[in-house]
Image: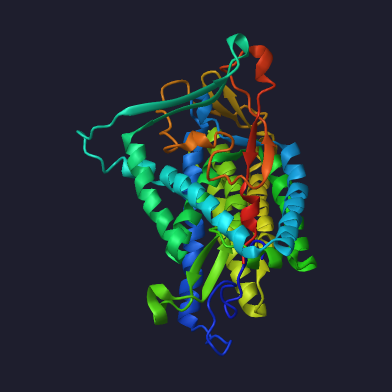
Amino acid sequence: MDSALRDPHNGSAGARSPANGTRPPSTPEGIALAYGSLLLMALLPIFFGALRSVRCARGKNASDMPETITSRDAARFPIIASCTLLGLYLFFKIFSQEYINLLLSVYFFVLGILALSHTISPLMNKFFPANFPNRQYQLLFTQGSGESKEEIINYEFDTKDLVCLGLSTIVGVWYLLRKHWIANNLFGLAFSLNGVELLHLNNVSTGCILLGGLFIYDVFWVFGTNVMVTVAKSFEAPIKLVFPQDLLEKGLEADNFAMLGLGDIVIPGIFIALLLRFDISLKKNTHTYFYTSFAAYIFGLGLTIFIMHIFKHAQPALLYLVPACVGFPVLVALAKGEVTEMFSSRIQRGKRGISIEGGTRGQGQLQDRGGGSRIPPAGPLWPLFPSPRPGLLLLLPIPCRQRNPQLPPRSRSQVGKVGVIFRFLYFDS
């Protein structure tokens, strides 16, 4: 079910049922533990992904530039997402579900390894000893020659990245063979953090357009048709975070899951990350809008859980998250008299780094003029998916405008990457 928390009394669509076809009711303690854990897991990629998005925006290298969604892209997004959803629905109706899920399992196995490698790379670097034999590697592919020469892949990585790739592969094999919920969550958290970090909105207006469009999309496909439910129940992939409600009774082999779609994390998360960058652009040494939107997300997700528990029916989380995540920061901006600055702030990238302009008053910029540290490599073999990067799943392409300052002026405006968002991850059970 699209961006919905699962009814705790129904359990997972893919879980095994007892022989008599019924499932014992979940205990209040199990339900509280499950939804408390889901809430915590949802907050982690948003918080740390937002912090990493600031570092990503400060990158001086052209290859470090995140995928950017413009207002035009945001307006078209719900339409493209609806066509994709309907297409998947027809696929599952026409072709064998078993073979489709086998193909998707291999696909997510590869993407999950790459996304998890990128996620753990900064943390793992702290554990390597100073005398670790770390060799540098570069993967370079170009197209054309002379002034029309264009870099398709220009990626640098090292031995430490290869170690991270090996550790991530172990988790990938575990997921591929067992489909264990812990391995699923490791991949899901990695996808979510990468999405918040690498997918940027160019301004708050674009974020409002995107969230507003997906709000309508969410309500229509969840309440208006059975298409979303059919696709969600047929799809087996780490597109959601899950936590067993019978963990206290069955331990790690529990199978009665509550779940939260990754779209409910990534979509609000990229908006919250934008507000953090806006906070920094104001140069007031406060993160008022970030903390406000972060608290609004907690409120919205908590309200979703409460409504679902009262009505015993899965709920589209964006129905509650969008008004909270947009409304609360706007109210704060109205109180502080910064509405103009909020809706006119834009992220720009120049030859010397990223600048995030903070509105018409010129109150500040977040800039990297060459003195900051370079973003660590994205992870081994990341350039095999140069546009978009793994972790931003390839199932739904969205044109994202980028200009490459390393190319000749006549070709810069013609160069664009295809950014891909987690909209498909919105289809959860």
Residue 136 vs residue 27, the one in the foreground: 136
Find residue 253 and report its horizontal and vertical position in percent.
Answer: 41, 74
Q: Nearer the viewer, residue 351 or 109?
A: 109
Give the x, y percent position of residue 394.
Answer: 61, 44
Q: How is the image coloured?
A: rainbow
Q: Residue 358: horizontal and vertical position, in percent?
A: 61, 32
Tell me residue 141's x, y (percent): 51, 24
Q: Quadrant of the N terminus?
A: bottom right
In this rendering, is residue 19 above or below 178?
A: below
Residue shown at 65%/39% (left/top)?
338
Residue that extends furthest to the right in the rendered view of this protein: 224
Which residue extends farthest top? 146
Q: On the rendered structure, is 375 left or right of 125?
A: right
Residue 145 shows up from this direction: yes
Classify the position of the C terminus by image quarter.
bottom right
Can residue 192 be seen in the rendering of this structure? no
Query: In terms of depth relative to the viewer, which is nearer, 71 or 124?
Result: 124
In which quarter of the view is residue 23 placed? bottom right
Residue at image point 63% right, 35% down: 68
Task: Relative to 354, say whether 72 is above or below.
Answer: below
Left or right, 156 with respect to 239, comes to left
